[in-house]
Amino acid sequence: MADRAPLLPLVLDDVSFVARGRAILDGLSLELAAGPRTIVLGHNGAGKSVLLRVMHGLIAPTSGNVRWSASEVPGEPRRQAMVFQRPVVFRRSAIGNLRFALAIAGVPRAERDGLARDALARVGLDAIAHQPARVLSGGEQQRLALARAWMLSPEVLFLDEPTTNLDPGASLEIERVVQAIHDAGTKIVMVTHDLGQARRLADEILFLHGGRLCERSAAAAFFHHPATAEAAAYLEGELPWRSTAAA
């Protein structure tokens, strides 16, 4: 609703997450504002995916606070969404998946078909609306997941490596959809291992190292003049255990 207070900024205050005695996130503090496309980078195990899940509310931090500027209202569609590396699709047609999501969100039945068709058209899937979702290609399933998130106009969309295991053409199509979602006014927070993709999409970079926010900067500055030795080593392709051994 137009008169609701915005969700953003999102504030993380000294957030840690410990699993099996290991600190996956370690005293992480940051504030995310509306607007810039935020790309999260770091080596495997740096805590990127866990950070997204903590921000989304899927898991609770072991310590610290996660605060949105406004609270979501029970019974109303969620104002932030997340799309995972492996898209979740139901045993329904492509359009049936979207209608089901709209029903769960409480959208009136009379509005569901039109919203679902519009969403499929925006991601280029209108021609296969009635195909079973589970027989679609990986790229098509990921676009369906993006359509499902986008059609409810979230203020924030978290994306956890949405192009992993996709071919270059399918990956670029996902990037096109992500850019369109951003252009429509949704804040994008995305994890990727693809540095080329990060260069194409990022306005700002969050670089995690060992569960800590090691560097935060504008994308151009990060790629051309990283401020930390850890970020420079990452961009050069150096493995973290090698830099530790060398020290």
Image: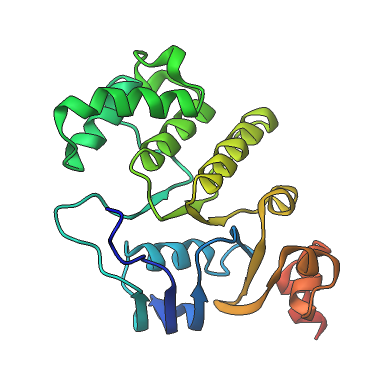
Q: Give above or below for 57 relative to 105.
A: below
The tally of labels here is 0
| Residue 135 x, y percent position in the rendering | 41, 19
> Which residue is the extreme one toward the front?
3
Residue drawn at point x = 50 percent, y = 83 percent: 29
Q: Quadrant location of residue 156?
A: bottom left
- Color encoding of the figure: rainbow
Q: Is residue 204 visible?
A: yes
Q: Give above or below for 187 relative to 176.
A: below
Q: Is residue 91 visible?
A: no
Question: Would residue 6 appear left or right of 30 to someone viewing this image?
Answer: left
Q: Give above or below for 118 relative to 58.
A: above
Q: Give above or below for 23 relative to 122.
A: below
| Residue 11 x, y percent position in the rendering | 43, 78
What quarter of the picture does the C terminus occupy?
Answer: bottom right
Question: Would residue 172 appear left or right of 17 to someone viewing this image?
Answer: right
| Residue 211 x, y percent position in the rendering | 54, 76
Residue drawn at point x = 65 percent, y = 31 percent: 167
Residue drawn at point x = 43 percent, y = 14 percent: 128
| Residue 206 x, y percent position in the rendering | 62, 69
Q: Quadrant location of residue 65?
A: bottom left
Between residues 153 and 215, which one lies in front from this camera angle? 153
Residue drawn at point x = 80 percent, y = 71 percent: 233
